[in-house]
Image: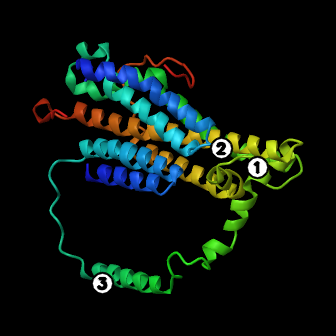
Amino acid sequence: MLFAIYSLLSAALFAVLDAGDVALTEAAVGAGISTILMLALLALVPRQEADAPRPNWPALAVVALTGSVLIYATLDFPEFGNPDNPVQTHVGPYYVEETYNDMGIPNMVAAVLASYRSIDTMGEGFVILTAGLAVYALLGGRRRRPKAKTTKRENGAP
Amino acid sequence: MRSNGILRIVARFLIPLIMLFALYIQFHGEYSPGGGFQAGVVFAAAWILFALIYGLDAALDVIPERAMYVLGLDAALDVIPERAMYVLMLLGVLIYAGVGVAGVILGGHFLDYRPLLDDPQYAQQLGIVTVELGIGITVSTVTMLIFTMFVQRKSESLESEPLESEEQD
């Protein structure tokens, strides 16, 4: 529940920041689907927590060390919001200026996702496919459905 | 939840609107916020809502509530069968990769849309719409499939457990 509320609030924040695509994604995925999947998962696991083993001190040390190194690395980031940052000077201006001439569509996010950075998006598609296959590998398999009355209506809305 | 009239009526009113909105953000994604990913998730959300509300079909009075999870999906699985999900989730990425290969065959680079049509702008738009459609199909079917898997596993564990450990969820 808290995650869903958090996601909804961040979606509102993204909408305020004029990032409509991200707001839509956050509202649909974060507040909607992941909540319902989390609830379905909670219905699967047992009520009682298993007895915790002894604390694993070497693992804690490794995690703490890695985390502190990562935090230290953030000190080298360029200044937040500086107009001379690489993110503002590299390919960003080209996308802002030339998207409409190249594609004839006004939504830059769609243009970058599906055309300029198309191979990345294809990778994302395969990541999602892999997630589905992994869940199938873990939970699928045993088919003992009592009824066999699935009709074939391909891809149809009801 | 089918016996709850408020839920049933509201869902009957909302589900077509949600699906229509999903199609809108799928095919209007070049002009307004949206795209294949969001559309797929919203479409899957409508389907999951249908499964949650209408799931416990007439089968409910044949087998009592312990089987409600697996039967709960039957109404929804009649709309989009599980086997169709396997096919469609592969079809989505194949559409995407197929657009890329079509660009190669027509003499460009992989996922280069310009060779597809004469006008480069229209070619880009065609490529974008097609790959977004592929992404939308894959995302929605994978989401539905994950939900289906969870619910079926729950129903299997309910079937194998003795009656007194049943829980009302």
Q: Are marks 2 and 1 in contact (CB under 8 Å)?
A: yes
Q: Nearer the viewer, residue B115 or B97?
A: B115
Q: Disc 2 residue type?
A: Glu
What residue is rendered at 44% in x and 54% in y? A16
Which of the image's four quarters has the N terminus of chain B?
top left
Q: CA distance from mark 1 to mark 3?
A: 51 Å
Residue A89 locus on image (x, y percent): 67, 74
| Number of numbered discs | 3
Dot label at residue A103: 1
* Local secondary structure at mark 1: helix
Q: Residue at x 46, y 50 (%)?
A: A23
Q: Crowdedness of circle 1 by 10 Å Cα count: few (<14), some, many (20+)?
A: many
- Type of amino acid under label 1: Met
Parent chain of label 3: A
Asked which quadrant contains residue A60, the reply is bottom left
The answer to whether B79 is drawn above or below residue A15 in the figure is above
Image x and y of residue A91, in percent = 70, 68
Q: Which residue is disc 3 drawn over?
A: A61
Identify the image quadrant of the C terminus of chain B. Answer: top left
Q: CA distance from mark 2 to mark 1?
A: 10 Å
